[in-house]
Each structure stands twice: as C-alpha cells, then as structure tokens.
Image (cartoon, rainbow, N blue to C red):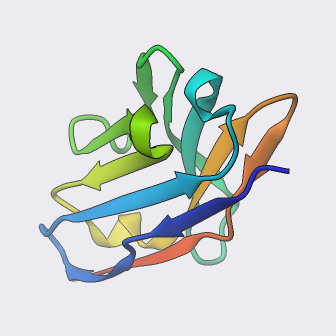
Amino acid sequence: QVQLVESGGGLVQAGGSLRLSCAASGSIFTISTMAWHRQPPGKQREFVAVISSRGSTSYADSVKGRFTISRDNAKNTVYLQMNSLKPDDTAVYYCGLQSTSWDWGQGTQVTVSS
C-alpha cells in the first residue's frame, strides 16, 4: 500500500503564497500520475491539479495561472505551489497517487484570511 504524507499547509493572508509537499512511499512513484484535490468547508472534494509521470499538467479553472504542480522523482515528492491565494482557496488539500486505483493522503489544512 502506498503511503502519502502531505505537508506545508497553514494560515496565510489573501495574496500570499504557500507550497504544499507530498512525499510518497514505494517504488511506483516515477510511473504514477499524481494529483491534488481539495475539500472546502461544507463542500464536496474537488479537483485542483494533476501531473502525469511524464510531467504533463492540467489545472482546475479556478486555480489556473495561480497554482503550479510539479514533481521530483528523485525524492518521490509532488509539490503544489500556490500563489495569489484567495479566501476561496481555504480547504483541506489532499495528495493522490494513481496506481490500479487512487490512493490519498490524510490532507493538510490551508486557510486564507481576508
């Protein structure tokens, strides 16, 4: 079973930046698609960004141009650089790895104050 551990969340003012990290265990990281999802308070979980094993990326319209997903295969780590944060970005952010199915981490809280 893959283990995913997110870090880097916290409290930031609107307009600020945070970088989330997700460290994955196991040897399948380099061949796996990785993703970030988020769950705002009182709402359903939603897609944020995805990166393929080859580095192709895709983003939700709500974060396009502000967030950047990247990966470091040598460190088995995927990142989410979040700039120009808005209060609407407040959520628990989850990292996922796609193998035969999706495995998800426990999440990290991001709170953006106005």
In depth, the one of 33 and 2 nearer the eye is 2
Image position of 30 (left or right of 104): left
Which residue lies at the image location 52% right of the left edge and 56% below the top edge?
23
- Spot occupied by residue 3 in the image (x, y as percentages of width and height): 72, 58
Which residue lies at the image location 34% right of the left edge and 44% below the top edge?
63
The relative height of residue 16 versus residue 68 in the rendered view (above or below) is below
- Spot occupied by residue 96 in the image (x, y as percentages of width and height): 65, 47
Which residue lies at the image location 79% right of the left edge and 40% below the top edge?
102
- Spot occupied by residue 50 in the image (x, y as percentages of width and height): 51, 32
Image position of 28 (left or right of 6): right
Figure quadrant of residue 19: bottom left
Image position of 24 (left or right of 99): left
Residue 39 in sight from this viewpoint: no
Image position of 50 (left or right of 26): left
The relative height of residue 31 versus residue 109 in the rendered view (above or below) is above
The relative height of residue 89 versus residue 110 in the rendered view (above or below) is above
- Spot occupied by residue 100 in the image (x, y as percentages of width and height): 87, 28
Q: The C terminus lies in which quarter of the figure? A: bottom left
Residue 6 in sight from this viewpoint: yes
Q: What count of labels does the image hold?
A: 0
In depth, the one of 67 and 98 nearer the eye is 98
Figure quadrant of residue 60: top left
Which residue lies at the image location 52% right of the left edge and 66% below the top edge?
6
